[in-house]
Image (cartoon, rainbow, N blue to C red):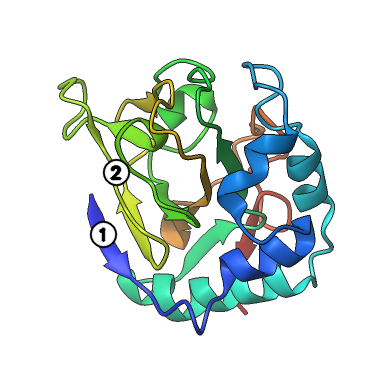
Amino acid sequence: MNKFKYDTNSYRFAENLEKVFLTKDLSTLHESLETFNVDTDQSSKYHKTFYKLRDDHSFFVMFKRFVENEIHPLFDEDILFQKKPTFRIHMKGNLAVGGYHKDRDYNHSEHEINFFVPLTEAFDSNTVWVESEEDKGDFSPMEASYGEYYMWNGANLTHGNKKNDTGRTRVSFDFRVLPKSKYTVSGKKSITQGVSFEIGKYYEELS
């Protein structure tokens, strides 16, 4: 697990989504939402708005530039990346949604690498907790500020969320990268969106 920094003046992810959601502070999104449960954590009005954005929306144009300029250089080969990142809101006082898991338990390739990009402060019980080695169970929080992100092995390390008792909502997005040499057509689909793990569907290739 490695933490990196990026320039928020070059990649204004939070500011872009604040315009989309008509708010001045992403950490206040919880004020107009009902508490999530395992069936609704990806279906709030903000999630629906995010996933309905066109592929050529400025957020996704910026995201692709981020992958090309910041993420691709971390690999020594061509990569495939999650075409549309997963949007998260971890509301204050909210129970953890779903159980602790490894992404490979949900049809993901064991060769995928995860990236966690907070758009608000991510700390203590409002962030993702992950073990240091497979099945070790020594969970610790991935703490980061806006302008920082993690590269980590979510496919094979157990991870999850706690009830957020920090008093502050965490907003973030995450995505997965697959070394192109590890790509195979498996016929499997993502659990949440039901998208096939294929180039042009779940994955996109840098042009």
Q: Which residue is mark 2?
A: 142
Horizontally, residue 48 falls left or right of residue 102, namely: right
Residue drawn at point x = 69 percent, y = 32 percent: 42
Cα separation, mark 1 vs mark 2, equals: 9 Å
Pick the residue in front: 204 or 139: 139
Can residue 34 be seen at all in this image of the molecule? Answer: yes
Quadrant for the C terminus, please: bottom right
- Whether the residues at callouts 1 and 2 have beta carbons within 8 Å, the answer is yes
Q: Secondary structure at mark 2?
A: loop
Pick the residue in front: 108 or 88: 88
Q: Residue 71: x, y in percent? A: 41, 70
Pick the residue in front: 24 or 60: 24
Per the rendering, the mark at residue 3 is 1
Q: Quadrant of residue 107?
A: top right
Name the kind of residue labelled 2 in the image.
Met
Q: Residues within 10 Å of mark 1 (few under 14, many from 20)?
A: some
Horizontally, residue 75 falls left or right of residue 22, namely: left
Q: Residue 142: x, y in percent? A: 29, 43
Q: Is residue 98 above or below residue 23?
A: above
Pick the residue in front: 136 or 49: 49
